[in-house]
Amino acid sequence: MAAIEAAEHELNRHTNVVIATKTSRNDIVTAADRALEATIRAKIATLRPNDSHLGEENGVLGPAGSDTRWIIDPIDGTVNFAYGIPSYAVSIAVEVRGIVELGVVADLVRHERFVAVRNQGATLDGRSIAPTQTDTLIDALIGVGMSYDPSIRLTQADILAQLAGSVRDFRQSGVASLDLCWTACGRLDGYFETGLKPWDYMAGALILQEAGGQSIIDDPGLNGNSLTLGAGPNLFPTLLSAINLAIEGQKPERYRH
């Protein structure tokens, strides 16, 4: 995809210096984030001038009333990038009349590209992928993500403590799109996180679904933030049930059903 290639080229022109914060001091922005998003938007506008865009850094742009919208995360894993941790990705999804039809996640370090087209399967560098067939939590390696909000993160830690004795182990990469893709190709058995935004999960969720896995993006989470969860088809219902029970246990008594 031309937009991904343009972003990869642009990344080499920028440092990882933090220039701003967003929702909290932990939610950082680098010059590369903004430059890559501008480059991606410009490339899309050249090829598809009538489409609109939703990007992490600059919100909604483009013609009003367009049937087609591009959802862009220029650097998923900005904290990793800023600290020199070699794990971050570009995530782009294409939504047509409210339905995600295309998802691309490009690992900018490993130079891997995950792609899915609705009803046409998912690939990693052109090869078909599939999730694991693991069906028990005790055999499951689970990816997790933590909130930028310290108060939510403390509650998430309590939930992980409840689940720790029931799973094989946890992994935290700091890159939601890649966690979903790694679940799609079997590097993880499952993944969950609370409080993601559309640019974090839309491409990865489609890739997981097209690979044969299952995902949800709007289950009730913590403090009004939705839960994003994905897994192979055999593990999905068990993992969802276990996490919902753990979340329920963290709610004040008056809010429990």
Image (cartoon, rainbow, N blue to C red):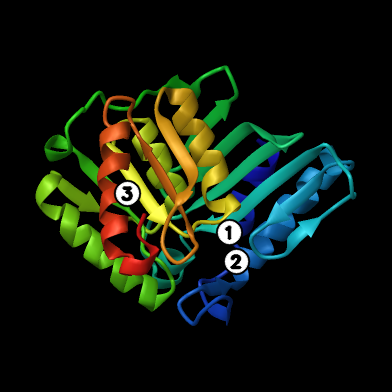
Q: Amino acid at mark 1?
A: Leu
Quadrant including the N terminus? top right
Q: Secondary structure at mark 2?
A: helix
For the residue marked with disc 3, what is the amino acid?
Answer: Asn
**Residue 249 sits in quarter:** bottom left
> Which residue is at a point 52% across and 77% down the rendered structure image?
17
Q: How many neighbours does mark 2 have within 10 angstroms: few (below 14), some (14-19), or many (20 or more)?
A: many
- In the image, is 224 to the left or to the right of 244? right
Q: Are marks 1 and 2 in contact (CB under 8 Å)?
A: yes
Q: Is residue 237 above or below residue 64?
A: above
Residue 128 picture location, percent across and down: 43, 19
Q: Position of residue 66 (x, y in %)?
A: 86, 41
Q: Nearer the viewer, residue 172 or 228?
A: 228
Q: Which residue is mark 3?
A: 244
Q: Residues within 10 Å of mark 1 (few under 14, many from 20)?
A: some
Q: Are marks 2 and 3 in contact (CB under 8 Å)?
A: no
What residue is pinned by disc 2?
32
Whether residue 14 is visible to the viewer of this picture, yes or no, is yes
Q: In this rendering, which labeled residue sits more in front, label 2 or label 3?
A: 3
Distance from Cα at disc 2 to Cα at disc 3 = 37 Å
Q: Is residue 59 left or right of residue 145?
A: right
**Distance between mark 1 and mark 2 Cα atoms:** 6 Å
Q: Earlier in the sequence, mark 3 or mark 1?
A: 1
Q: Which residue has dot 1 on it?
A: 11
Numbered tag placed on residue 202 in the rendering: none
- Discs 3, 1 touching: Cβ within 8 Å: no
Picture residue at 60% right of the left edge, 23% below the top = 118
